[in-house]
Image: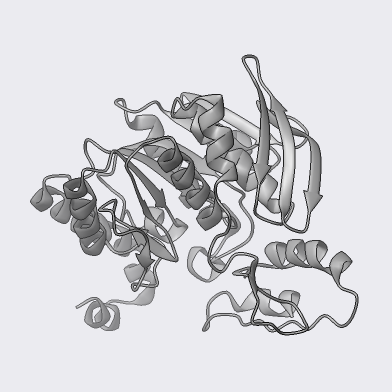
Amino acid sequence: MRSLIKKIIPHGVFVKVEPLGHLLEAMLWQALAGFPARGLRVIGVTGTDGKTTTSTLIAQMLRHSGKKVAMLTTISLDLGDGNGPQPNSTRLTTMGSRQLVSKLKQVRASGAEWLVLEVTSHALAQNRVWGIPFTIAAMTNIKHEHLDYHKTFENYRDAKKRLFTLTGKNKRGVGVGVINQEDPSASLFAAEVPNSILYGTKTGDLVAKNIKQTASGSTYSVKTDDATYKITCNLPGGFNVYNSLAALGVGRAAGLSQSEIEQGVSSLQSVEGRMARIDEGQDFEVIIDYAHTPDSFQKIFDEIKPTVRGKLVVVFGSAGRRDEAKRAEQG
C-alpha cells in the first residue's frame, strides 16, 4: 500500500504527509494492543554512533543488579523471556509500529520490568515510538548521518532530540536525560528534560579521570558528590569510555548502587560486531566493527593504527544508495 501511495502522490507531498501516516498507524496499533509499554520502565538510547554498545552496557548493568530486563537493538532482540538475545531479523534498529507493538506485548507478557530501546532518527521523525513512555533518555553523540532522508543536519539533530522531548513529557517517569557534554548539541537536548546528567572527559556531572587504556579495554575514575566510581570497561577503544560513561549516568538515574554500576559495566565482555576480534588460529589479527560514518571510521583508525606493526588492510562498504555524500570521505 505504501509503495502504491508513493507512486500516486508527488514526492514532495508524500514526504510531508508520511509522518502523519506513521503517527496514525502507531496510534492504531498502540490502542488495539492496550499500550503494552505502560508499566515498563523504558530507557531510550539515541545518537549517531555507539547506540548499540551503550544499550548493551545499560541492559547488562541492570541485569547484573537483579532487574528483569528486555532490550531491542540493531543487532538483537531480548524480550526478557529467559531465552536471551536473538538476532534482529528485521534489520531495522527501530522497527515499524506494528512490529514494535507486537514485540512490546511479548516484553510485557514476559514480566520484564525494564526495557532498553535503541531509537533511530527515522523512528522519531516518523512517530513510530508514539505511545511509549520513556523514563530515561541517553544521547551518545550527534554527527552528520542519514542526510539522504533528513536533508539537513538540523532536521536530523531535531529528530533525535524528540526522544528527550518525549521523556520530558512523561510525568510518570524520572525525566532524566543523560547527555554527552562534549557534543555541540548537548544544551539543546538538555533543554528538553527536567533533569540532565552530563558526561565527558573534560567537564560535566560525570567526568572520567585517570583514564588508562589497553588493547582489551580501559579503566578510569569518576568522582561525584556522593561517591568515587572505579570503572573497568572491558570493551576496547577510547570511544567506549564515553559509552560506559553514558551507562553510568543511566545507572545513577535508575537508582542503582555504586557497586551495581561498577560490577555491571565490568561484567560485559564484548558486543557482537563492535570491535570484535576473530580468532581462528590465523597469524594475523581480524577485527570487525560496525563503524559506518566518517567520524566513527576516524576513531577506529586512531585506536587500531598504533597497534599495527605490519600492513593494515581495510575492507568496508557503504550501504545501498543511502547518504552517498559520505563515501568519498570514508574511502
Most foreground residue, 5 or 66: 66
Please indicate whether residue 130 sits to the left or right of residue 262 in the image.
left
Residue 42 in the image: state x and y as whole percent.
35, 40
Residue at 86% x, 72% y is 308
Q: Position of residue 141 (x, y in %)?
A: 62, 49
Name the residue rendered at 25%, 59% in the picture: 97
Q: Is residue 134 left or right of residue 299?
A: left
Q: Is residue 3 above or below residue 119?
A: below
- Depth check: give the residue in front, 186 or 101: 101
The residue at 58%/40% (across/down) is 246
**Quadrant in the rendering for residue 173:** top left
Q: Is residue 187 above or below residue 239?
A: above
Q: Quadrant of residue 211?
A: top right
Residue that extends furthest to the top in the rendered view of this protein: 225
- The residue sitting at 37% across, 75% down in the picture is 11
The C terminus lies in which quarter of the figure? bottom right
Q: Is residue 169 left or right of residue 5?
A: right
